[in-house]
Image: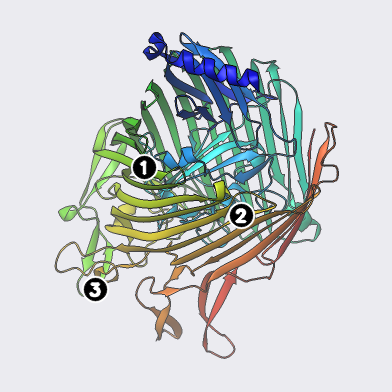
Amino acid sequence: MRHKIIYTLLLMTISFVAYSQEKVTLSGTITVKTSTEAIIGASIFIPEAKVSAVTDAYGFYSITLPKGAYTIVISYIGFEHIEEHIFLTKNVRKDFSMLEKSKTLDEVVIKYHSSASDIRKPEMSVNKLSISTIKKMPAVMGEVDILKAILQLPGVSNAQEGATGFNVRGGSVDGNLILLDEAVVYNTSHLFGFFSVFNADVIKDLKLYKGGIPANFGGRTSAVLDIYQKEGNNKEYHITGGIGAVSSRLLAEGPIVKDKGSFVVAGRASYAHLFLKLADNPNSVSFYDLNAKLNYKINDNNRVFLSGYFGKDNMNFNNFFSNNYSNSFFNFRWNHTFSERLFSNASVIYSKYNYGLKIKSVGIDWLSDIRNYNLKYNFSHHLSDKLVFNYGLNSIYYQFNPGTIKPLDATSPINADQIEKKYAWENALYISAEQKITNKISLNYGLRYSNFQRLGEQNVNNYANNQAVVFNPELQIYEEGTPTGITHYNKNKKIIDFGNLEPRLAVSYSINDDQSIKASYNRMSQYIHLISNTASVSPLDIWAPSDQYLKPEILDQVALGYFRNFSNGKYSLETEAFYKKVKNKADYIDGAELIAHKAIEQVLLNGEARAYGLEVMLKKNTGKLTGWLSYTLSKAEQRTPGRNAGEPGINNGEWYRANYDKTHNLSLTAAYQLTKKWNFGGMFTYQTGKAATYPVGKYQYQGITIGNYGARNANSLPAYHHLDLSATYTPKPDSKKRWKSEWVFSIYNVYGRNNAASIMFEQNRETGWSEAKRISIFGIIPGVTYNFKF
């Protein structure tokens, strides 16, 4: 005790010496001690100066202080705290390694920060997930699924039953920018959405931005899901895996050069289709994916990474209908530290998504794809402990293949054809700053300029009055326009370009250490679009670039929130209200046929969209029982008025429910640690039924009964709800042996709710009466998985 008092007095004396006002910088990286894996979001606190910082996406931190003696306190959930004394007389680079509190199988858990530093941080509408030894999320089919976890958060809803596409604050699926190691992922689903493409074993950290999106992100108008893969253990080799009823997975990691370089490789594959074959079932569904990452530390200032992913789905239904789709990317990344205050990251990325369809009855074999070549160069500049700048550039070159059409066999009536490919170039410059104005007020502000150019080689249709869609006043319907001519653009010749300024602003006012009020505004531009008249990603969707007919979407969003911690962080409450409006929202004329359409502009009109709502999240953070209750009350609408007084527009130009409108969205997530050996988890979800258009009457045409449909999306599918439960058994939780294992037992949709993916209206052949049939995809699905690590 005496030594501690003497040290404290010495610390106070040194802090007031004359040279203490001269500033120096403490910087470095924070990693996991057992693997040197960089830790994202670790908190660094200097009590004497009341200064704090967090590590960035690469584990880097930088704090500027007057010369003197300080105590460094480092913390991160699931790891032992670090407390170290240091005397600063010059710029110092100091790296820290953190030790995990317990050694159990890694799992993905929700980590919703509720500390005072996060209360004060000008960051709102952001949810974080990370790898942790604390098991919080129920595991369905033995696997923790990142996207299923995201669906339990306020403001997030599922696209529909059987799809992992998700909607954020009334935004469409294509409005989500989904990044895996900075590469764009266009389709997030395996097996009709029952699994996501993200293997939880290899995921290191992620953030979901619902609003207040930083200026370094752009190109979408709804949300950003930023995911990073593990870097691999550079000290020792490890194997992690799981054997389940539907699929299995395996991960290997270890050093390439000890303490300097490492690798991680992970794979998953399903085998349900093998059981179907044994049962002479003609249907078949399967998937596989592969993740890989290499990294090498050249020296203290330079580090390089090479990461990649490839995943594919194959589906065949009675040899009548089959389709496949795949995602792939490669990313070469270079981290460079210029000085204690300036850090950079450069990335060169190739990404591809292709999707195919075969229909035996039509005799068609159809394939489409989208590719991009992406260059990013970002800088993080720590000017002082109160001001940090981030700036950089981003350039993406796109290649769109709307459709390569081939005859399925020699008897097919289909002629081989190639829908004209499209090319585009998207560029952006941005700068943003995080600034602490006073002890109570913090700001995050920035500006992004984006430019999008459509490029040749392409033949572009010309139309009378520049209208690709025409209105027939006699039939009172919209019809496809007839081209009046063609303009040819040579390779790389500019067809049209767009430019937009995108300001961003977020402010936090701390009432005290446990309460704050935050507000944000951001403008976003989206230049590529998912051409689909369904609400979720499917293999039939086509990506298309903006042009003179399909305008870029422009989003403006504001949000206001109140955040509070109770009982020293045991409980936390977060509430946010938001309003967003989108210009140039694409809409489809009635009866639009999208597949293999050579002039997609002939079925599209530009309208507008809006969404507003209230989100509430109450969370219990500590104890044997943990979890949260989230509720969202919201409205999402769309409108496409007529282009002139003589046109009615879509739905008579009136606002109507968007496909992804969910008035009520309630989620309850809980985890209970019964003993060291047994953990239990549960998730309950309730959502208002998806918008739908029902027939309001019928008429006869040549002996066939045809439905007469009412106003667009004026009806709703039945409410969507289900309960999932899981139990995890760890045979030897205190074992010191390298081999560690657990059994995960789960039940998806415990009470067997037949949630409607759609409603089909048809005429009963026996009675002649019209009837509605509910189409459901999933019932009760039990599962068991054996997980291991050594």
Query: Which label's residue is closer to the chain start, 1 or 3?
Result: 3
Residue drawn at point x = 52 percent, y = 89 percent = 769
Quarter location, residue 742: top right
Q: Callout 2: helix, strand or loop?
A: strand
Q: Amino acid at mark 1?
A: Ser
Q: Amino acid at mark 3?
A: Gln
| 26 relative to 529 in the view: left or right | right
Residue 141, placed above or below residue 354: below
> Between 339 and 14, which is closer to the camera in this rendering?
14
Residue at the spot of label 1: 508
Residue at the spot of label 2: 627
Number of other residues with Cα within 10 Å of mark 2, as a class: few under 14, some 14 to 19, many 20 or more: many
Residue 546, placed above or below residue 34: below
Marks 1 and 3, how far apart in space? 52 Å
Number of other residues with Cα within 10 Å of mark 1, as a class: few under 14, some 14 to 19, many 20 or more: many
Number of other residues with Cα within 10 Å of mark 3, as a class: few under 14, some 14 to 19, many 20 or more: few
Residue at the spot of label 3: 476
Q: Callout 3: helix, strand or loop?
A: loop
Residue drawn at point x = 56 percent, y = 77 percent = 773
Marks 2 and 3, how far apart in space? 54 Å
Residue 163 x/y as whole percent: 55, 56
Residue 121, placed above or below residue 279: above
Query: Which label's residue is closer to the chain start, 2 or 3?
Result: 3
Query: Which label's residue is closer to the chain start, 1 or 2?
Result: 1
Residue 693 x/y as whole percent: 41, 73
> Between 168 and 174, which is closer to the camera in this rendering?
168
